[in-house]
Image (spheres, rainbow, N blue to C red):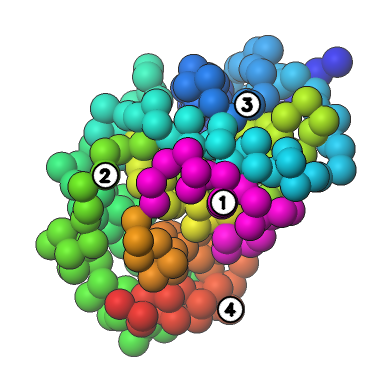
Amino acid sequence: MDFTKRDPAAPEGFFAAEAAGLAWLAEAEGARVVGVLEVGHHHITLERVTPARATAAEAATFGHSLAQTHAAGAPGWGAPPPGQGEQAYIGPLPQANRIEPTWGEFYARHRVRPFADRAYADGTLTAPGHATIAALCDRLEAGEFDDTSQPARIHGDLWAGNVITTAGGWTLIDPAAHGGHRLTDLAMLELFGNPHLAETLAAYGDSANLPHDRQELIPLHQLHPLLVHAVLFGAAYGAQAVAAASRY
């Protein structure tokens, strides 16, 4: 059986970007990824997966496999999946997958600033809040939060709704895949929660060395999704974004 998503109003390349991201993640042979059966300008057809009860054991298996996906790497910070240009999406919103020399430059220029500007223009981010986030972006671009890690192959929108708990292995759907920091995926899981998250994170840590200050950095990596939610769902998320930025 299969499952088809259709959107006659989808911009050119919207579903192609999703298909390319899924294929790229699947090539890592780590976390299970939903199969793409067909893609067109206004639709994508995927294999149908059947949700099952989440278990701690499968959560741990997912943690190990996610670390393997990340370890497959990417050509640069912000690199798009092979064959894709810079135009990308997170949910219905456009964003850019544009390679920059450092993670901080990529994250500030193509994830945080654009959505902070849009939220401010929409009225879901206050002027003082926008100024706080802009100041943090200056520090990001200056390299204050860069480390020695290499670009990881990340899902990019890894909230609970994009991890389907199936009996055959937890399955990734709806990516915003790019070359990014592995903490970005882990931060998204922590932001909105996921079944047996502690087991997933422990298993991930067994498979990949995590920064000793990981917990201190998680809100920094949650800033982008919070701003995306501010654009989509309102000022409450804008306030949460400012609270996260204010920590730094």
Verify CB contact (< 8 Å) between mark 1 and mark 2. Answer: no
Q: Is residue 111 above or below residue 14?
A: below
The crowd level at tag 4 (other Cα within 10 Å; few <14, some 14-19, many 20+) is few
Mark positioned earlier in the residue sequence (3 or 4): 3
Q: Are marks 1 and 4 in contact (CB under 8 Å)?
A: no
Residue located beneath label 4 in the image: 236
The x and y percentages for residue 105 are: 21, 52
Q: Residue at x 50, y 52 (%)?
A: 186
Dominant SS in magenta: helix
Q: Residues within 10 Å of mark 2 (few under 14, many from 20)?
A: few
Q: Amino acid at mark 3?
A: Val
Residue 55 placement, left or right of 172? right
Residue 28 visible (yes or no)? yes
Residue 149 numbered mark, or none: 2
Q: Is residue 62 magenta?
A: no
Q: Looking at the image, which residue is at 63% across and 26% down?
A: 32
Which residue is most to the front?
206
Residue at image mark 3? 33
Question: Which quadrant of the view contains residue 119?
Answer: bottom left
Left or right of residue 180, residue 3 in this image: right
- Element class at badge 4: helix
Q: Position of residue 49 (x, y in %)?
A: 80, 27
User: Sequence-wise, which precedes: disc 4 or disc 2?
Assistant: 2
Pointer 1 residue:
202
Residue interval drawn in magenta = 190-210
Q: Are marks 3 and 1 in contact (CB under 8 Å)?
A: no
Residue type for callout 1? Ala
- Quadrant containing the C terminus in the rendered view: bottom left
Q: Which dot, 3 or 4, sits closer to the camera?
A: 3
Disc nearest the viewer among 3 and 1: 1
What amino acid type is highlighted by mark number 4?
Ala
Gap between marks 4 and 2 measured at Cα? 33 Å
